């Protein structure tokens, strides 16, 4: 999360070009939305499992990052591909996400804009419906969130590749064992992984190749592979100390 913000700051200063970043997490990490209450989290269980905890710069609800590919798109506010409202830019980027899934042979679709969406208090991102949600066989497959800052726009999201989606319930606080089990059952009804749909394993590398091809085609851009610059690395390390590893940020109510 610190790297995403460091790239966003660098782009705002004109030092970094618009960026598509693809990455994975090790060890597994529970990320919570910008405004999500820390009371949603079972910190004892997270510690016992050796998982990490971080609060995102973007909104939304909790995601357990493991066995997945995570993407981030970072660009200036004047970039035409990111122009318009949050929903308009998200809908544009979703076309690239849909093509990536198509290249992986996943029959995905983006659901229509939700009208009069009721306020949800569910703590899990993949349980909460969103505008133009990307689904396969009626189940949510990609969860995304966007933040708009003076420096530019950041959208990131995750595609679960394999593994047990219900593990996230072990990282969240529930009033009883029964409530935790019910949340796990609801999650399996509402969300899925690429492996569950295809009945075969999709590697991180295969997914990354599909993302690169899809974003290049859909947004009509030529992506250039690059490592983080020394400035981005140094700023990310500062942000870890000042923010993303600090209780004042992660554990605020």
Image (cartoon, rainbow, N blue to C red):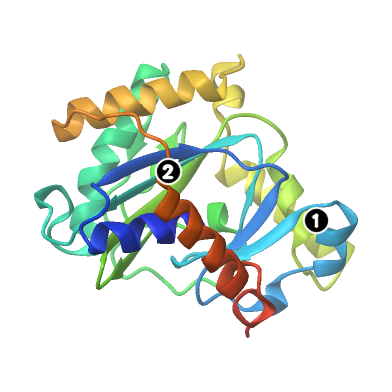
Give the quarter of the image for residue 77: bottom left
- Residue 26 relative to residue 33: left or right: right
Up/down of 119 relative to 203, above or below: below
Q: How far separated are the C-alphas under marks 1 and 2?
A: 34 Å
Q: Secondary structure at mark 2?
A: loop
Taking the image as shown, residue 152 lies to the left or right of residue 117, namely left
Q: Is residue 3 visible?
A: yes
Between 93 and 109, the one lying in front of the other is 93
Q: What is the number of the mark on residue 69?
A: none
Q: Position of residue 235 (x, y in %)?
A: 46, 62
Determine the residue positioned at 29% across, 71% down.
Answer: 149
Disc 1 element? helix
Quarter holding residue 26? top right
Mark drawn on residue 170: 1
In the picture, measured across the screen, residue 231 lies left or right of residue 180, that is: left
Quadrant into which the C terminus falls: bottom right
Q: Can residue 128 be seen in the rendering of this structure?
A: no
Residue at image point 57% right, 20% down: 203
Residue tagged 2: 228
> Residue 156 at what x, y percent from top left?
41, 51
Where residue 206 sits in the image (x, y, percent)? 48, 18
């Amino acid at each position: 999360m610190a790297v995403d913000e460091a790239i966003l700051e660098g782009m705002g200063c004109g030092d970094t070009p618009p960026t598509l970043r693809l990455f994975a997490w090790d060890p597994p990490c529970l990320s919570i939305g910008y405004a999500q209450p820390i009371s949603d989290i079972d910190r004892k269980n997270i510690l016992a499992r050796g998982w990490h905890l971080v609060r995102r710069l973007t909104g939304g609800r909790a995601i357990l990052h493991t066995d997945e590919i995570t993407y981030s798109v970072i660009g200036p506010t004047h970039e035409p591909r990111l122009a318009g409202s949050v929903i308009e830019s998200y809908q544009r980027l979703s076309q690239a996400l849909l093509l990536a899934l198509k290249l992986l042979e996943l029959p995905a679709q983006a659901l229509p804009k939700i009208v009069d969406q009721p306020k949800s208090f569910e703590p899990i991102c993949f349980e909460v419906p969103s505008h133009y949600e990307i689904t396969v066989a009626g189940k949510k497959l990609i969860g995304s969130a966007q933040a708009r800052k003076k420096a530019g726009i950041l959208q990131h999201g995750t595609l679960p590749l394999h593994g047990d989606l219900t593990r996230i319930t072990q990282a969240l606080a529930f009033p009883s064992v029964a409530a935790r089990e019910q949340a796990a059952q609801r999650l399996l009804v509402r969300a899925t992984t690429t492996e569950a749909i295809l009945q075969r394993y999709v590697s991180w590398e295969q997914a990354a190749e599909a993302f690169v091809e899809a974003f290049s085609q859909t947004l009509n851009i030529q992506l250039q592979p690059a490592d983080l610059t020394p400035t981005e690395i140094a700023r990310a390390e500062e942000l870890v100390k000042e923010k993303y590893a600090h209780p004042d940020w992660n554990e605020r109510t």
